[in-house]
């Protein structure tokens, strides 16, 4: 019986976190601006599927469903929402472009050169700057460029492009 209670508690905690994410998304000025820009009504906030799934990355959108790596639970809520905003952009892209997953052309491009990823990262970084400050967002962007092995000579231009929405 104890094992079942502990397992239920973990499931309950995940469901509570997903509910908190959904409420935060509904109340986010950035998410509201995004749906307005994409000409999608606010029904999307209740409809977008959110779930946890073991992934090789922190978060991923597949066919309009946002999947979060369970490891994300240990992160601060602001960091979790930073990833959710990124994936929410992809949901909107999927809906408006009827883009279900990756196109062959996407696979031929470097990840941070793809238009869909650039846009998603711009909003993610803007969200991060709004929540944690511009200094933290700059550090995150620098770490992102390092992680993706962006050559030193390209980093300044790529950083400027990714931080374009940060004012």
Image (cartoon, rainbow, N blue to C red):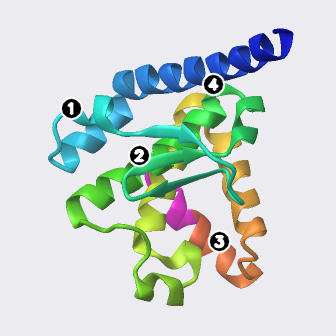
From the image, tell me which residue sits under label 3.
Answer: 156
**What separation in Å lies between label 4 and label 1 (alpha carbons)?**
23 Å
Question: Which residue is found at the position 53% from the left and 38% from the top?
Answer: 51
Residue 61 shows up from this direction:
yes
Q: Quadrant of residue 4?
A: top right
Q: Earlier in the sequence, mark 4 or mark 3?
A: 4
Q: Quadrant of residue 129?
A: top right
Q: Nearer the viewer, residue 146 or 48?
A: 48
Q: Nearer the viewer, mark 4 or mark 1?
A: 4
From the image, tell me which residue sits under label 2.
Answer: 88
Where does residue 18 sit, x and y in percent of width and height? 53, 26
Q: Is residue 163 left or right of residue 22?
A: right
From the image, tell me which residue sits under label 1.
Answer: 43
Q: Nearer the viewer, mark 4 or mark 2?
A: 4
Q: Is residue 61 above or below residue 160?
A: above
Asked whether residue 47 is drawn in magenta, I would say no
Placement of the N terminus among the 4 image quadrants: top right
Q: Which residues are magenta?
A: 160-165
């Amino acid at each position: 019986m104890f094992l079942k209670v502990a397992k239920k508690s973990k499931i309950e905690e995940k469901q509570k976190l997903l509910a908190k994410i959904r409420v935060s998304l509904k109340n986010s000025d950035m998410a509201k601006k995004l749906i307005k820009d994409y000409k999608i009504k606010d029904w999307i906030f209740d409809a977008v599927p959110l779930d946890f799934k073991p992934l090789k990355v922190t978060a991923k959108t597949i066919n309009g469903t946002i999947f979060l790596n369970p490891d994300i639970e240990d992160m601060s809520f602001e960091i979790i929402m930073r990833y959710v905003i990124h994936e929410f952009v992809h949901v909107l892209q999927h809906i408006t472009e009827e883009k279900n997953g990756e196109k062959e052309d996407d696979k031929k491009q470097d990840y941070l050169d793809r238009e869909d990823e650039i846009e998603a990262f711009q909003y993610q970084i803007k969200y991060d700057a709004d929540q944690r400050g511009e200094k933290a967002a700059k550090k995150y962007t620098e770490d992102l460029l390092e992680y993706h092995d962006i050559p030193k000579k390209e980093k300044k231009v790529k950083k400027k492009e990714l931080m374009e929405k940060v004012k």
